[in-house]
Amino acid sequence: MKNKIILLFSTFAVISVLTGCIGNKNKTIDETTTRGNIRIGVDEAYQLLFDTEIYTFESLYKYSKINAAYKSEGEILNDLMNDSVRFIVTSRKLTNIEEQTLKNAHIIPKTTKIAYDALTFIVNNENPDTLLLYSQIKDIFSGKTGRWKQLNPKSRLGDLIVVFDNNKSCNTRFIRETFELKNNFPEYCFAVKSNPEVINYVEKNKNAIGIISVNWISDKDDTISHGFLKKIHVAYVGDESNTDGTGNFYKPHPGNIAEGSYPLKREVYIINRETFIGLGTGFAQFVAGDQGQRIILKSGLVPATMPVRLVQLRKELRQ
C-alpha cells in the first residue's frame, strides 16, 4: 500500500512538471514579432525618435508593449550584457570582448544599422560666434583653447564653458575617439545629466558651448524639438580641409549628414540579443523597414536602410 502511495505521488509530480513545461512552452510561443511585452534600452540621445517609433508600432500592433529605458550609453550596454533588456539602441557596435562574452553565454548578438546621426554644438542665442573650425574643436578638448578670444579675437566673452550630457554618454565617448584624446577633459568641461539639461544650461550661460545629439533639435514638427531650437543657436562646423576659416561651414541637417559634408557624423545601431524570433526581432525589423525608416527621416536623422533622394542639396557657407 505504501509503495502504491509513493508511486501515485511520483506520477502526480511528473505530470505536474510536464504540465509546467508545456505551460512555459506555450508562454514562449505566445510571444510573436507583433505580440508580447518586452523591455529595451535606448541611448538617451535618441529618446525623441524612439518615443515616436514605439508609439507607432504599438498603435499598429495593439497586443505589443515595448518598455524603453532611456539611459546613457554606458548604462544601456551594461543592461544588455546583464540580460536586463532585450536589445539596445546605440551609436557604436559591440567590442570584440563584449561579443565574445555574449557568445560564451550562447547568445549571438544581431547588429542592425538604422540611421546616421551627428554630434551637434550649440551656443547661447546672444553669442554671435556660430562658426567652429574642426581644428578649433580639437584644441578645445585637448586643452589648448579655453577662451572665446582664441576662437574669435573680436569676441567679448571670457572663458569657455563646455557642457556634456553625461560622463558615460555616447557624446563624450565619440569626442574622445574622434580626436584621439588620451587625457582627461580640460577643467572647463563638465557634464550634467541629459541632453535637455545641456540645452537649458546653454540658454542661460553666454560663455557656454553645449554638445548634444542632433536628434533633440532636428524635428521641427515636434513640439519639444521646436521649443529647444528657440532657446539656442546651432553652430556651423568646418570640415577638416577648412583650416583657416575661408572654406565652407556646415550645419548638421540631414542633407549635410547624408552627403558627408558635416564632419561629425556617426551611425546608429540596434543590437539585439534575442535568442528566438520574438517581439524584439519584430520591432527591430519595423524600425529598419519602410515605416520605421520614414519616421527616422521625418525626425531629421538620415535613414540607413532606405535610399534618400537629395533634391537641390545646398552646402552651408557662412564666412
Image (cartoon, rainbow, N blue to C red):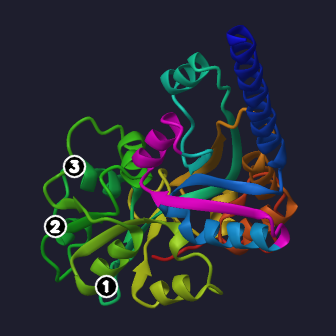
Real-space CA distance between mark 3 and mark 1, rounded to the nearest whole angstrom: 22 Å
Q: Which residue is mark 2?
A: 147
Which amino acid type corresponds to the residue marked 1 in the rendered image?
Glu
Quarter occupied by residue 233: bottom left
Q: For mark 2, give the secondary structure.
A: loop
Residue 246 visible here: no
Query: Relative to 71, is 194 above or below?
Result: below
Specify start and end residues of the magenta stretch as a single range. 60-84
Circles 3, 1 touching at the beta carbon (< 8 Å)? no
Q: What residue is at 52 percent from the left and 43 percent from the top?
A: 84
Report helix, strand or loop for mark 3.
loop
Residue at 77% in and 44% down = 27
Discs 2/3, front: 3
User: Horizontal and vertical percent for residue 22?
Assistant: 81, 34
166 to the left or right of 58: left
* Magenta-colored stretch includes residue 70: yes
Find the distance from the CA under tag 2 to the CA under tag 3.
15 Å
Q: How many numbered circles are shown?
A: 3
Residue at the image point whose x is 80% and y is 65% from the top: 63
Q: Nearer the viewer, mark 1 or mark 2?
A: 1
Query: Rounded to the nearest whole Å, what is the CA distance between mark 1 and mark 2?
Result: 19 Å
**Residue under numbered circle 3:** 185
Residue type at mark 2: give it. Answer: Arg
> Which of the numbered marks, if any, corresponds to residue 106?
none
Q: Give the label on residue 203, or none.
A: 1
Label whose residue precedes the other's in the sequence (1 or 2): 2
Residue drawn 77% across the image and 41% down it: 28
Q: Are marks 2 and 3 in contact (CB under 8 Å)?
A: no
Rendered view: 183 above or below 266: above
Place of residue 312 in the rendered image (x, y in percent of width and height, measured from the top left): 79, 74
Where in the figure is residue 275, as x and y percent of width and height? 72, 32
Amino acid type indicated by mark 3:
Phe
